[in-house]
Structure formats: structure tokens, C-alpha cells
Image: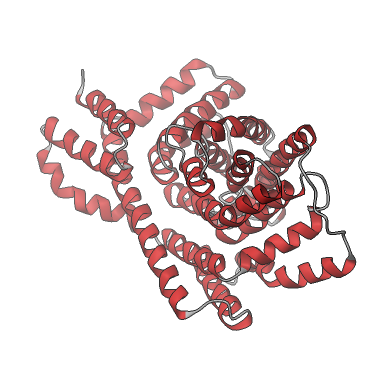
């Protein structure tokens, strides 16, 4: 067996054993250099590690994370929940719809599925359970709707895709907006079916114009966050990275000066969480860039591209193969390394079958987000399980219909390019 074959086997074995992905990538890379007799290449590892992280576009990631942390700790979640409860709480299964709508709102602020689960789950899951909803269902709704966050702008995975391929960040942001809303709509359909079948309760408070105005007033300024980010990018006032910095400033002003709900202690705590999260992401990106370099040395991207194209020259069939391939990888590794490792393989395939770069980027992100809900290593799944404190197998059973509904959305996005292309075209970010 070849050295690269042994390296790939070691990669999956170490992942299966539960070793953190950054160590898996690092250990396998060093193993390859030693066993292949290319020890001299070890001297380039620090350089490659730094080059993988050395991108101005990637600077948006810690800034968006920081903005999300500030919003999370500054009573923003409660304000969004209050507005959503006014809008949809009165119907049967109302808190389920509130959960869906809050994930839509909050996704437009943080761009992170894990932030969504941690922030909304800690409030919504106990509230739904107290109101008479099954804990597993409440946790499943929280997890399933959280994947809207990385689709609805701003989107951290979209920034990673842009850094790896050079695709416009603004176009990717807008391209993911409608697919993100469709994911929320699909989850709402499942909530409707389950609520009717299980006779879940509805809110006892009647809808009134006064409650609506109070909810809109309370959540108005937080809801402006995605509009400020995208508006500034589209008008040309600032770049996506500068937009992330503006988001941080806006979050600080909003929570610290307007609402006065964000203390100096919470600022330091948010900063520490941002540093820890960013360090993990950037180390993974750097390690993944080294492993990706090894794959390119062994010509794996070309081999995989030929293998995928060898099944059929039909666009539909090839796109099915791409989706299956990415979904499988998304079940095993986190979003950041998956993007860095898979894009050099799949981007040329997508170009050969005529997929637009933005369309392909959105498909990649949606695939990987669905993968985050599935075992064995779906981070969103396990984060939700930890927040909801429910048995894992029961949670997976509740998630199955949500995942199936999201796969339907994936099929629509894959085969109807207009869904992801209409907004970027409308705002002139891609050619007509």
C-alpha cells in the first residue's frame, strides 16, 4: 500500500478514536513526511501552517465571533424571543415556531450554528419543556434550526469558502440567504406536523397591536445588524472584514450604551471566549492547509476529480455524487477543515460540470451544516445534546425528520440554481 493510502487510513482511524481534528491533521502530516522519506519538508511545516492562516478575509471570523458573543450576553436573545413569541406564539406548537424564528433572527447576527444552540438552547429548551413539550423535541428543534446561522448572512463558513477559493464573500453571503430561510421553513413544517400529532400547547397570550409594537421596538436595533453588515458591503462602504469590525462596534454600543446590559466583566469573558474559539479555528485551518498540501503533492485532487467525473458526464448525477461525498465528510470532521480539504478537490469538478462558483459555495456550506447534525462527530448535534441534557439516541430519532426535510432543501438548492443566485445577481455581485 502507498504512503498516502496508509496516511488516509490513519486519518480516519484517529478521527474514529476521537482525537481532536487539529491533532489528527498534524500527526498524519508528520507521519507522511517521515514515512515517505521527505523529512526535509518538515522544515516547511511552520511556514505552511502560517500561510494557511495568513488571509485578510479570515480576519472577519474572530470579529464576527466577538460580535456574536457580545450580542449573546447582552439581552439580545431575550428581545428576539419576545418578538417571535408575539408573531407565532399563539398557534399550536407556538414555542416550536418561536424557536425556528429566533434561529432565523439570531443567525443573521452571529453566523454560527454553535452560538445559536448555546444562546437560544439555554433559554428555549427549558421554556418549551416547562410548557409541555418533550425535551428531545425541544432540543431537536434547537439543533435543526441552528444551521440557518451559517447560511443567513453573515456566515463564518462563507468566509472560509471565500478564503479558500477567492469567491466574493458578499455574493456568498447573499447566496445563502434564501437557502437559509428555506431551511427554517422546512423545520417549521416538521414542527407543524409534530405539534398537530402530539397536541402541543399554544401561547395563552392573545395577539395585540400593543404587544407587537412593544416586541418590534425591543428587537428593532438588534434586527438591524445584518442590514448594516450587508448594506455596507453592497454599497461599497466597507469590505466584509471591515463589516465584521463594524458589527463588533455596533454590538458594543447597543448592549453597553443603549441597553446597558453588558458589563466590563462580560466584555472580558466575551473576549476570552472569542480568543479560545478563534485559536481553535485558525489552528485547524493551518493544519488542514498542510494536509491539503500533502494531498496536492500526491495528486489526490485530480484523482478524486477524475473519479467523480468518471461516473457520468451528466450534471445531475455528478451533483448527486458531490452531495453524497460532502455529506459523508461533514459527518466526520468539522466545517473548517472540511472546507480547506475538500474545496481543492471539488471546486475543479464543479467548474467542469458548469456550476457557478457562488452556487457551488452555497451547496458546500449547506451540505456541511447538515453533516453537523449527524453522528458520529456532528458538533451541532453534540452541543445541542449537552445543552438539552437529553439521551443522544432519543435526540437523533427526533432529528431524523428535520434532517430529511433539510436534504429536500439541499436538493432544491442543488438543482434550482436560481435559489442561491437570484440575490447576488439582483445586487450586481455576479454577472447576469
The colour scheme applied to this rendered structure is secondary structure
Vertical comparison of 334 with 260: above or below: above
Q: In this view, does 62 lie to the left or right of 158?
A: left
Q: Which residue is drawn at 26% across and 51% down?
A: 49
Tell me if residue 282 can be seen.
yes
The residue nearer to you, when weighing 315 against 127, is 127
Rendered image quadrant of residue 291: top left
- Compared with 162, 222 (above or below) is below
Nearer-the-camera pick, 315 or 91: 91
Would residue 424 be visible to someone looking at this image?
no
Image x and y of residue 386, in percent: 47, 46
Q: Position of residue 185 (x, y in %)?
A: 73, 42
161 left or right of 24 in image: right
Residue positioned 44% across, 68% down in the render: 270
Image mark count: 0
- Residue at horizontal 26 percent and vertical 43 percent from the top: 23
Furthest-bottom residue in this view: 257
Asked where in the image residue 105 lies, by quadrant, the reply is bottom right
What is the x, y in percent for residue 84? 74, 58
Image-based side of 396 in relation to 184, left or right: left
* Residue in the foreground of this view, choosing between 245 and 43: 245
Q: Residue at x 81, y 44 (%)?
A: 92
Report the front residue among 207 and 151: 207
Residue 76 point in image, percent of width and height: 62, 67
In this rendering, the answer to whether 148 lies above or below 399 is below
Q: Quadrant of the N terminus?
A: top left
Amino acid at each position: 500500500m502507498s504512503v498516502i493510502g496508509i496516511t488516509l487510513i490513519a486519518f480516519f482511524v484517529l478521527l474514529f478514536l476521537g482525537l481532536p481534528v487539529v491533532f489528527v491533521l498534524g500527526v498524519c502530516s508528520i507521519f507522511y513526511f517521515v514515512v515517505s522519506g521527505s523529512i526535509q519538508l518538515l522544515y516547511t511545516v511552520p511556514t505552511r501552517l502560517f500561510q494557511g492562516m495568513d488571509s485578510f478575509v479570515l480576519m472577519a471570523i474572530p470579529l464576527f465571533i466577538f460580535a456574536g458573543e457580545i450580542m449573546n450576553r447582552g439581552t439580545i436573545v431575550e428581545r428576539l424571543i419576545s418578538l417571535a413569541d408575539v408573531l407565532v406564539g399563539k398557534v399550536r406548537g407556538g414555542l416550536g415556531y418561536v424557536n425556528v424564528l429566533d434561529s432565523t433572527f439570531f443567525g443573521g447576527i452571529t453566523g454560527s450554528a454553535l452560538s445559536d444552540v448555546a444562546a437560544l438552547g439555554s433559554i428555549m429548551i427549558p421554556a418549551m419543556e416547562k410548557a409541555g413539550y418533550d425535551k428531545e423535541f425541544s432540543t431537536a428543534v434547537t439543533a435543526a434550526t441552528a444551521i440557518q446561522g451559517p447560511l443567513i448572512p453573515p456566515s463564518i463558513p462563507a468566509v472560509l469558502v471565500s478564503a479558500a477559493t477567492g469567491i466574493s464573500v458578499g455574493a456568498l453571503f447573499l447566496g445563502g440567504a434564501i437557502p437559509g430561510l428555506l431551511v427554517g421553513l422546512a423545520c417549521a413544517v416538521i414542527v407543524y406536523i409534530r405539534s398537530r400529532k402530539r397536541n402541543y400547547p399554544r401561547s395563552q397570550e392573545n395577539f395585540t397591536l400593543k404587544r407587537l409594537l412593544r416586541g418590534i421596538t425591543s428587537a428593532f436595533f438588534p434586527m438591524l445588524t445584518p442590514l448594516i453588515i450587508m448594506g455596507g458591503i453592497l454599497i461599497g462602504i466597507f469590505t466584509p472584514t471591515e463589516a465584521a469590525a463594524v458589527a463588533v462596534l455596533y454590538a458594543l454600543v447597543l448592549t453597553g450604551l443603549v441597553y446597558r446590559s453588558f458589563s466590563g466583566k462580560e466584555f472580558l469573558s466575551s473576549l476570552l471566549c472569542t480568543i479560545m474559539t478563534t485559536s481553535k479555528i485558525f489552528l485547524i485551518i493551518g493544519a488542514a492547509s498542510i494536509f491539503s498540501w500533502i494531498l496536492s503533492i500526491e495528486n489526490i485532487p485530480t484523482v478524486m476529480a477524475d473519479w467523480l467525473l468518471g461516473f457520468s458526464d451528466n450534471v445531475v448525477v455528478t451533483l448527486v455524487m458531490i452531495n453524497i461525498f460532502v455529506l459523508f465528510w461533514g459527518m466526520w470532521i468539522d466545517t473548517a477543515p472540511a472546507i480547506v480539504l475538500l474545496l481543492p478537490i471539488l471546486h475543479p469538478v464543479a467548474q467542469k460540470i458548469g456550476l457557478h462558483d457562488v452556487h457551488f459555495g452555497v451547496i458546500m456550506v449547506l451540505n456541511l451544516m447538515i453533516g453537523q447534525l449527524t453522528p458520529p462527530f456532528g458538533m451541532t448535534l453534540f452541543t445541542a445534546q449537552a445543552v438539552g441534557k437529553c439521551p443522544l439516541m432519543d435526540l437523533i430519532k427526533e432529528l431524523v425528520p428535520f434532517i430529511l426535510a433539510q436534504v429536500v432543501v439541499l436538493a432544491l438548492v442543488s438543482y434550482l440554481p436560481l435559489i442561491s443566485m437570484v440575490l447576488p445577481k439582483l445586487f450586481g455581485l455576479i454577472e447576469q
